[in-house]
Image: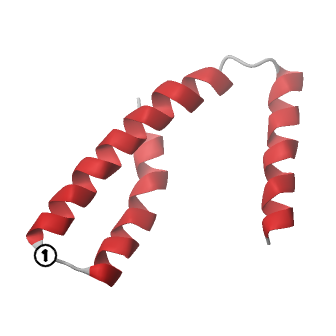
């Protein structure tokens, strides 16, 4: 169930690991970190937002897009 979160989380971690060091230990830590973060994101965020009503989901999406727009 947390595969989508893993898909989103793994790439930034892979990039950081490749930039700062590519030893077996750092890659192992990265794999474990990806797994833990994807499970945490799934349990805390994904389960929550999939239960939202349509109006609440639209509000959340608008809010998140606004944060991205202001960040850029």
Write the residue at 30% across / 50% down. 33
Q: What is the x, y in percent for residue 41? A: 49, 36
Q: Is residue 68 above or below residue 24?
A: above
Q: Is residue 15 above or below residue 28?
A: below
Front residue (pair 11, 16): 16
Write the residue at 85% across / 64% down. 69
Q: Which image quadrant for residue 21? A: bottom left
Q: Is residue 19 above or below residue 72?
A: below
Q: Locate the C terminus by quadrant.
A: bottom right
- In the image, farthest residue toward the left: 24
Count of marks placed on residues: 1
Q: What is the x, y in percent for residue 45? A: 58, 31
Q: Locate the N terminus by quadrant.
A: top left
Write the residue at 49% across / 53% down. 8
Other residues around mark 1 within 10 Å, as few (<14) / some (14–19) / many (≥20): few
Image position of 25 (left or right of 19)? left
Looking at the image, can residue 2 be seen?
Answer: no
State the residue position of label 1: 23
Q: Which image quadrant for residue 24? A: bottom left
Image position of 31 (left or right of 63)? left
Q: Which image quadrant for residue 37? A: top left
Image position of 17 (left or right of 29)? right
């Amino acid at each position: 169930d947390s595969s989508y979160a893993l898909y989103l989380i793994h790439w930034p971690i892979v990039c950081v690991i490749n930039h700062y060091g590519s030893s077996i230990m750092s890659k192992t830590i990265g794999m474990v970190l990806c797994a833990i973060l994807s499970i945490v994101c799934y349990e805390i965020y994904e389960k929550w937002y999939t239960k939202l009503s349509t109006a609440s989901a639209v509000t959340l999406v608008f809010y998140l897009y606004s944060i991205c727009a202001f960040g850029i």
